[in-house]
Amino acid sequence: MEMDYFLTDDQKALRDLARKIAEEKIRPVAAQYDRDGTFPWDIVKVFAEAGLFGIVIPEEYGGLGMGVLELAIVTEELSKACGGITLALAASALGTFPILLSANEEQQKRYLPDLAEGKYLAAFGLTEPNAGSDAGSMRTRAVRDCDDYILNGSKIFITNGGAAHLYTIIAVTDPTKGSRGTTAFIVQDDYPGFKVGKHEDKMGIRASATNEIIFEDCRVPVANRIGSEGQGFLVAMKTLDKSRPGVASQALGIAQGAFDLALDYAKHRFQFGHPIMNLQAIQFMLADMATSIEAARALLYQTARHIDAGNKDISRYSAMSKLMASDVAMKVTTDAVQIFGGYGYMRDYPIEKYMRDAKITQIYEGTNQIQRLVIGNTLIKG
Ligand code: COS
């Protein structure tokens, strides 16, 4: 029996819906998408029809009006089948958070209904070639010109890049003020001067689009500025505080998916005259895997509840949940490959993909070293 996390009937129904989509729609095509590295538009349609793009969007804008916990539950379920395909949904939520958290009513009215419907996808643009962990050192410039800002520069490793229609972009409006001189914008892909650059060929999450986004004198209306000038870094940090549990849930789903396959394999693989599950060496590995997965889930669900309850100072727990779940995912998927032995290393078997997909969760939305820094800073400040 699964651990009882005291989910409501609505949360259980959403979990079951996501589980059904994962098993019926995603699992059968996961290996093909991994091989081809193409974007899963057919699955995006399934997500949209199920209303999943609206999970965290208020009902008044056509969403389900739910929270970080429900988004985590769905992301986890979908990621059990494929952590890459799931990102089309999770990265759109990441791109939507700045609008949800910091945009004005007019902007929310203009954009949230279409995002909730899944009519188009969103993406988040913070990272640059020379501004990764040191996000505050970004160079993309936004210069005011009457009723527009003119953007120049580029953002890299943008998840949903090229697939999304809406991009929440952080750019420098006052280069003398460091991170306090940055501003957030909603940029549409049909604005003049918006270009999609290099498409990345990745180790894992290959069904996810990762692209460079280039701004060449890209005109963005002042009406699309989120908050006031100088608040860009804050918008980004508040976004990451809400979205990092999403990475944790992706990592958790990848770990659980790999564990389920490894457990099944251990029960059916015969060596020395009996299933390898009878060997304590294998049992102990699976016991450790199951324990660490459950611990990561408990921290994630409690973090999500803590955030959804409207508590302030959520950075610490958000970072902890991402740190723990992604480290668990890497360890569990590596051990799962080990249990499969030589077969596990072969692409004919589904397990090595989980290990490749897991790695990014320790890196993006802040490396785990940055998560420790964020946690450490909250410990210093008390
Ligand atoms: N919530 C609200 N405010 C925050 C905040 C948060 N979570 N984190 C930082 N701030 C504020 C600080 O309080 C500070 O405000 P003041 O200027 O008023 O003092 C300001 O933002 C700058 O903070 P800090 O000095 O800590 O910034 P640093 O440049 O040292 O960087 C880290 C902080 C490392 C945490 C930040 O750069 C970061 O998160 N990097 C990783 C980026 C990342 O996750 N990238 C992934 C790509 S996005 S998918």
Image: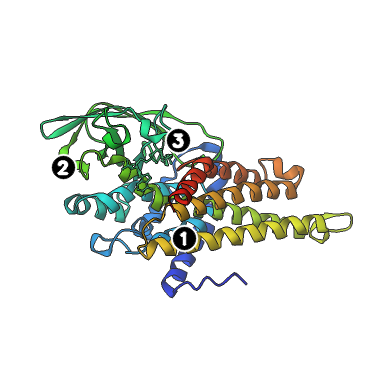
Number of the front mark, 2 or 1 = 1
Which residue lies at the image location 67% right of the left edge and 43% below the top edge? 348
Height in image: 323 above or below 287?
above
Helix, strand or loop at label 2? It is helix
Say whether residue 270 is visible. yes
Residues at marks 2 and 1, CA–CA distance in whole angstroms = 34 Å
User: Which residue is under mark 3?
Assistant: 133
- Where residue 275 appears, x then y in whole percent? 81, 59
Q: Looking at numbered disc 3 in the image, what kind of residue is underneath it?
A: Ser
The one of 176 and 266 positioned closer to us in this rendering: 176
Q: Is ligand 1 less than 8 Å from the beta carbon at label 3?
A: yes
Q: Looking at numbered disc 2 in the image, what kind of residue is underneath it?
A: Ala
User: Which residue is under mark 1?
Assistant: 303
- Where residue 190 appears, x then y in whole percent? 24, 35
Height in image: 354 above or below 134?
below
Mark toward the start of the polypeptide (3 vs 2):
3
